[in-house]
Image: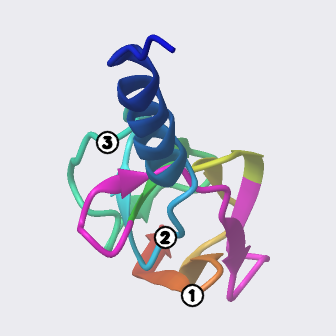
């Protein structure tokens, strides 16, 4: 019976790919803008919008090793009359200023949770 090095290598690759793609997020950070997967940017804390203005926020989830991992978090607002979540597509959400005030945005996927504090609409 002939054996080849191909099978163990491919099995190792599949296992590595599976564990990377299925790693559960343990921490999360939210950045301003429409960022590609794994890219970091300016934190969304202290975001200021003018009434009627919209922007996009991007959540970056990390696994236990600090590596980016795919996430589909739930986005909620503490004061829905101040900020509206216009669209949510996985780790990205559209945010719109509805009326003057201040609120927080909560982003959660399992144990990973981040609170964007001090979002203000003027």
The residue shown at (46%, 81%) is 114
**Residue tagged 1:** 111
Q: Residue at left 31%, top 42%?
A: 38
**Which residue is identified by label 2?**
25
Looking at marks 1 and 3 on the same chain, the residue that comes earlier in the sequence is marked by 3
Residue carrying label 3:
38
| Mark sitting earlier along the chain (2/3) | 2
Upstream in sequence: badge 2 or badge 1: 2
Task: Tell me the magenta residue range.
Answer: 63-85
Q: Residues within 10 Å of mark 2 (few under 14, many from 20)?
A: many
Q: Main secondary structure of the magenta part?
A: loop
Tell me where residue 5 sits by quadrant. Answer: top left
- Where 93 falls versus 84 (above or below)? above
Q: Do the numbered discs 2 and 1 sit on residues whose CB atoms are within 8 Å?
A: yes
In screen coordinates, is 16 left or right of 107? Answer: left
Q: Secondary structure at mark 3?
A: loop
Image spot of residue 104 (x, y percent): 54, 84
Front residue of this view, candidates 1 and 76 = 1
């Amino acid at each position: 019976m002939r054996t080849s090095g191909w099978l163990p290598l491919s099995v190792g690759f599949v296992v590595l790919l599976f564990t990377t793609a299925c790693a559960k997020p343990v921490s999360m950070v939210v950045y301003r803008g429409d960022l590609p997967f794994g890219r970091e940017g300016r934190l969304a804390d202290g975001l200021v919008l003018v009434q009627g203005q919209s922007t996009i926020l991007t959540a970056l989830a990390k696994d236990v090793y600090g590596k980016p991992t795919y996430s589909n978090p739930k986005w909620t607002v503490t004061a829905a009359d101040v900020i509206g979540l216009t669209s949510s597509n996985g780790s990205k959400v559209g945010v719109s200023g509805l009326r003057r005030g201040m609120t927080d945005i909560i982003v959660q996927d399992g144990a990973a949770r981040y609170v964007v504090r001090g979002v203000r609409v003027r």
